[in-house]
Each structure stands twice: as C-alpha cells, then as structure tokens.
Amino acid sequence: MDYFQEKYINPFTDYGFKKLFGEEPNKDLLLDFLNELLKEEQGEIVSINYIKSEQLGDTSIDRKAIFDLYCQNEKGEKFIVELQKTKQKFFKDRTVYYSTFPIRDQAQLANWNYELKAVYTIAILDFVFDEDKQETDKFRYDVKLQDIDTNQIFYNKLTFIHLEMPKFNKKIEELETRFDKWLYIIKNLSKLDRIPDTLRESIFEKLFRTAEIAKFTPKQVKSYENSLKYFRDLKNSFDTAEEEGFMKGVENGIKVGIEQGIEQGIEQGIEHVAKNLLLIGLSIDKISVATGLSEDEINKLT
C-alpha cells in the first residue's frame, strides 16, 4: 500500500462514500450522520434499513434512477443520500425527479387515503451553485414547499437538503457541534494522517478504522483505485474546463480593453486637434466638418 499517499480513503469517490455509509456493518455511521443532519427536523432516528438503490419507472419510457444511497427509518420515512462531485446542468431537476420514486412507491391498493410518509433528498456537493456564490458563509440549504406570500410551509413531508462542501471552511479548532465534525471529516478525511483529538468519539473512531486503506483487501484496494482514478480524472477535466474558461475570459477582456483604449485614444486625439483649430481662429462649422465633431461637442471644448 506504499503507493498511496493518503492514509484514509476519499469520501468523494463512489467507493469511499459507499464504503463508509452504504455497507450494512457501517449502517450506524449513516444513522449518526442523518441524526445530526435532521435532529431539529424530526428528532432521533432509531434505526434505518437500506433499500435497493436502483428504481425503475412505471412504464418502459420512464428513465431508470440509480441513487447513491436509499434507506428508510422505523417510521417508513425515506432518505435518498446523493454525492455529487461536479456541476450538472439539471442537477436540481434530477433531485426532484428522484424524489418521485419513493413517493410513488408508497401507493397502496384498495381504500388508500393518500397519506404519505416523509421523503428526504440529501445532496452532498463538491461544488457551489453559481446562484449561491455570493452567500459565502451559507453552505446548507433546506428546501420545502411553502407559500410565497406568507412563507408558511405548505407541505412538510418533502425536503431537499443541499450541502455545498467547498463553503465549509472551519478548522479543527473551530468545530462547535457534532454536525460540524461530520462535515469536517467528509471534507478532510483523505488529507489526515491520524485522528485529531477533537474527533475522539467512538463513532468517528470507527469511521477512521473503516477508512484506513492499509486494512483493505487487495480486491478492495483495486476497487478503490479505480474509483479514485475516475474521481481524479473527472476533477481534472472540470478544473481544466474552468481554467480554459477563465483564460478565455481574460483574453476577451484584454481584447475589449485594447479596442476601448484605441477608441478612447482616437476620441482624445480628435478633441486635441479641434482645440488647436479653435486656437488658430478656425470657425466652429469648419472644425465640425474637419473633425466630425458636432458643434455642441466643439463648444464644450472651449
């Protein structure tokens, strides 16, 4: 394992995320994370069970949905937990589409009265939406259906939570809550070489043990290698596209600046000629013909 520079897996890889949160022996890690994420929303979740993460539509023309993680609690409430590494044009549309599967799954035959259990769609994002960039300190977005005028919640059983991880920049000594600790671990796990004292809690110690690459079997190492390569290639492609876009913007800015400078220089030169013609006593109407300036523009130079 010496060729790995990191001691712990990267949670933003598909393999790393599912290793930590999607395996039955580590179900308590996901349970603890959800409890910290949602404790103000609904209190303690006692237990969760994984559900098959591949869902098929009702008809052949419906597209298939594959969730990263899909589970339900003891009340029958459903949780979709997604990890998104790069921007996707219609990502918000996709999360809304995904939420329809656990809603439709609840349909019952016979005398069903349409009562639904709550559905939570949680997205851990390794990017920031363009429309959110001005809110540099806000990394968590909780979205529900509400009335526009009164801001009252219209329906409280459908919740979308987005965590924009690049905005979470707390240092280890600044962590105040267990939720802070969870976000710090998710963002920084692969950069750490030991468990910080601040994170010495049994649930986090288990996570660090689970994430230690040196304890993987050769098969697990291979799977993680493939997932890590895909993650790095994807990130590199995205970073390259951003850099090329930035450089193109700079080039365009320079070009526009030069053009504007030339235009401004020409205007200033014409005005200078007009002033000199005024000094030698040439009439305003003749100066207008010679320079192309209007008589009003020439009068302002006097």
Image: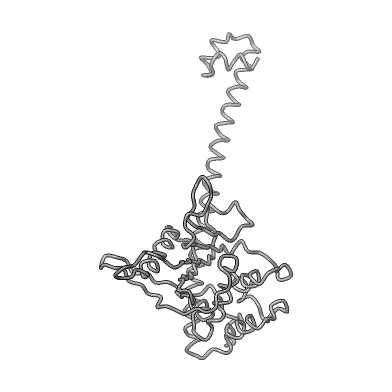
Looking at the picture, does residue 116 appear above or below residue 134? below
* Position in image of residue 125 (x %, y %): 53, 65
Looking at the picture, does residue 110 appear above or below residue 262? below
Tell me how many marks there are: 0
Residue positioned 58% across, 82% down in the render: 211
Q: Nearer the viewer, residue 258 or 64?
A: 64
Q: On the rendered image, what quadrant is the C terminus found in?
A: top right
- Horizontally, residue 226 falls left or right of residue 191, namely left
* Position in image of residue 230 (x %, y %): 47, 74
**Quarter residue 89 falls in:** bottom left
* Position in image of residue 210 (x %, y %): 57, 85
Q: Nearer the viewer, residue 265 or 231?
A: 231
Q: On the rendered image, what quadrant is the N terminus found in?
A: bottom right
* Position in image of residue 229 (x %, y %): 49, 76
**Quarter residue 269 falls in:** top right
Residue positioned 53% across, 47% down in the render: 150
Scheme of image coloration = one colour
Residue farthest left in this picture = 60
